[in-house]
Amino acid sequence: MANVVVVGAQWGDEGKGKIVDWLSERADVIARFQGGHNAGHTLVVGEKVYKLHALPSGVVRGGKLSVIGNGVVLDPWHLVKEIATIRGQGVDISPENLMIAENTPLILPIHGELDRAREEAASKGTKIGTTGRGIGPAYEDKVGRRSVRVADLADDATLEARVDRALQHHDPLRKGLGIEAIDRDALVAQLKEIASEILPYAAPVWKVLNEKRKAGKRILFEGAQGALLDIDFGTYPFVTSSNVIAGQAATGVGVGPGSIEYVLGIVKAYTTRVGEGPFPTELDDADGQRLGERGHEFGTTTGRKRRCGWFDAALVRQTCATSGVTGISLTKLDVLDGFETLKICVGYDLDGERLDYLPTAADQQARCTPIYEEMPGWSESTEGARSWNDLPANAIKYVKRVEELIECPVALLSTSPERDDTILVTDPFAD
Ligand code: IMP
């Protein structure tokens, strides 16, 4: 296969960073196609730990082209800092190996301020629990046709006109929320200053990628967040503001849908979520506590404690369908070591009726109770397993049951944050 899309198949934090890094060894190009620096991908390479937010995971590998596509919203100040941090860890980053689509909308300080002010003003039940990075307001401006985009940084008159257009919308909003008025000239000056650091990376990404594709180069599309946070198919309104599902890979960089040949869904062996919103299998007990502690479930971006619960096969079956997942990478199986009994949600009870998917209507979601299947756990350690022979029989049974229930095969099994602690069943890049 020439091109592979990696998507999170739950609420994010499934361990995509490690898998993308592992796959990037086989790829020529690694492209981010949605989200922004709300993402947090941790890569462990030997002794080094890299924490990436806006940069594609491929940057830590030499000889690869990393791409930030137009489907992303980009905070230029954050990016410049992140580049400096990763460079400080000995990684080479230059326009030779990093490109940013010229049509990428920028996240401005006004977006973060608006995001945080809205969250502060929200009452219980309406708060989203965003990362506060300005992601939602930046996407709103994109759709509202008032973004400042990367290409606008190259011409002062255009830049100023774009800023004025955005402020026409933001000034009254800020007033209503009690945020102080924007110093328009200071914002323009800040943008002019950062322009020289961003523009060297600007490129017609759609063109570059289409040329790479024609030349038979392998492209890895790196998704962020998870399909249950998708603006259309997630648990709306407790979602992020972009399409997260695999279809976005095409529009988020400018290639045709036929360019995507394999969709790898990243699936954690249990479930976590940060922020507000429905979570049918959430555990508010010692088992939930144990999953959180063993899985080190704290957000990479915000440091928030993640909510934890049993594996929800009904939801993952749903996300495998909406993203057309070819195979999954099952991660963090080792976190389940030592549980006497494991539960898997196979569907929901809604007012006495059995459903095999989570309904869309919020009131129905609230009335859904999970239907569980119980499986015996295992006492042996699976941490660091590199072949099926290293796994206890009950762990294999658990994995096989997951495959059956989600109607999708396991392609990769990850058993620790280390890059090599992976059991390979199918190489998504294999022909
Ligand atoms: P936003 O993307 O900052 O607007 O946040 C919207 C929702 O998505 C919140 O519930 C966040 O916690 C969640 N979210 C955003 N990015 C990530 C991520 O990378 N991992 C997990 N959850 C995320």
Image (cartoon, rainbow, N blue to C red):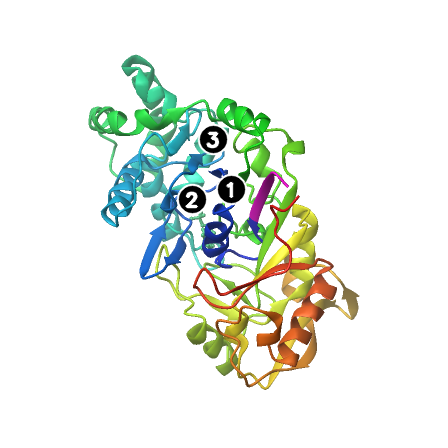
* Secondary structure of residue under mark 2: helix
Mark yes or no: residue 9 visible. no
Residue at image location 76% in from the left, 63% down from the top: 355
Residue 13 in picture, x, y percent from top left: 48, 58
Mark 2 burial class by Cα count in 10 Å: few <14, some 14-19, many 20+: many
Q: In the drawing, does residue 72 fall left or right of residue 88?
A: right
Residue 145 in picture, x, y percent from top left: 47, 24
350 or 159, nearer to the observer: 159
Q: Which residue is mark 3?
A: 70
Please, what is the three-letter code of the amino acid marked with disc 3? Answer: Asn
Counting residues from the start of the chain, the first of labels 2 and 1 encountered is 1
Classify mark 1 as within 8 Å of ligand 1 or not, answering yes or no.
Answer: no
Which quadrant of the structure image shows residue 387? bottom right
Q: Which residue is mark 2?
A: 58
User: If the image is split into quadrants, where does the N terminus sit?
Assistant: top right
- Does 2 lie within the magenta span? yes
Residue at image location 68% in from the left, 67% down from the top: 402
Please, what is the three-letter code of the amino acid marked with disc 1? Answer: Ala
Labels 2 & 1 near each other (Cβ < 8 A): yes
User: Can you name the residue that lies furthest to the right here?
Assistant: 353
Q: Nearer the viewer, mark 2 or mark 3?
A: 2
Q: Main secondary structure of the magenta part?
A: strand
Q: Nearer the viewer, mark 3 or mark 1?
A: 1
Magenta part of the chain = 1-6
Counting residues from the start of the chain, the first of labels 3 and 1 encountered is 1
Q: In the drawing, does residue 55 fall left or right of residue 1?
A: left
- Does 288 lie within the magenta span? no
User: Of the numbered discs in the image, which one, if any, rests on residue 27?
Assistant: 1
Disc 2 to disc 3, how far (Cα)? 18 Å
Which quadrant of the structure image shows residue 175? top left
